[in-house]
Image (tube, grey):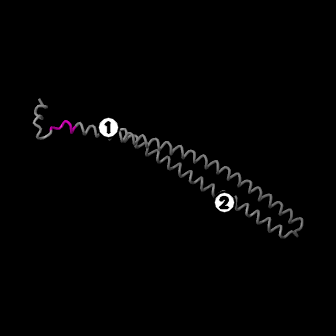
Amino acid sequence: MKNRSEKISKIVSIAASDERRHGVAAGKSRLDLEAHRARLGELHAYRHDYCATSQASMSINSAHWQDYQKFLQRLDQAVSSQRQIVRDSEQNLALHRQRWQEKRQRLDSLQKVLERYRDGEKVDADRQQQRVLDDLPVPGNPFADDLDS
């Protein structure tokens, strides 16, 4: 028959695997968020540079001005969309971190239970060994024969 520590050891192993999987997902979400923030920064920088170069050449006709305005609107829409993607990524990261922390806490609890079970089993094994040693006759003890009768 398996002892309790062997049984819970399998559960701890599964919980550790689950915790690692959620940790990896949280890490991927963090990397995704960083990439989305970088993209937003690039869009802001591009818009700033485009506005600066366009203002330097202010002698443009009305057709070019309309194209300029339309392009800025599309660029502003792209910035707005990217901001929303960043917000969504932040929420996704928060969710993944929360799930990972919950799995981590569960794993810690299970590991503590496993440690208590192993400690208890060691104490039981030590007691059993001591009982066996106590029952052995001591060589050279003149009273050993009296104990058997």
Q: In the rendering, which numbered label is found on residue 1?
A: 1
- Residue furthest to the top in view is 149
- Residue furthest to the front in view is 142
What is the secondary structure assignment of the residue under circle 2?
A: helix
Residue 119 location (% of width, % of height): 36, 41
Magenta segment, principal secondary structure? helix
83 relative to 106, above or below:
below
What is the secondary structure assignment of the residue under circle 1?
A: loop
Q: Identity of the amino acid at label 1? A: Met
Q: Earlier in the sequence, mark 1 or mark 2?
A: 1
Q: Quadrant of the N terminus?
A: top left
Residue 104 location (% of width, % of height): 50, 45
Q: Which residue is mark 2?
A: 38
72 relative to 144, above or below:
below
Residue 41 location (% of width, % of height): 70, 60
> Magenta includes 133?
yes
Give the extent of the magenta segment. 132-137
Query: On the image, which quarter does residue 101 sit in?
Result: top right
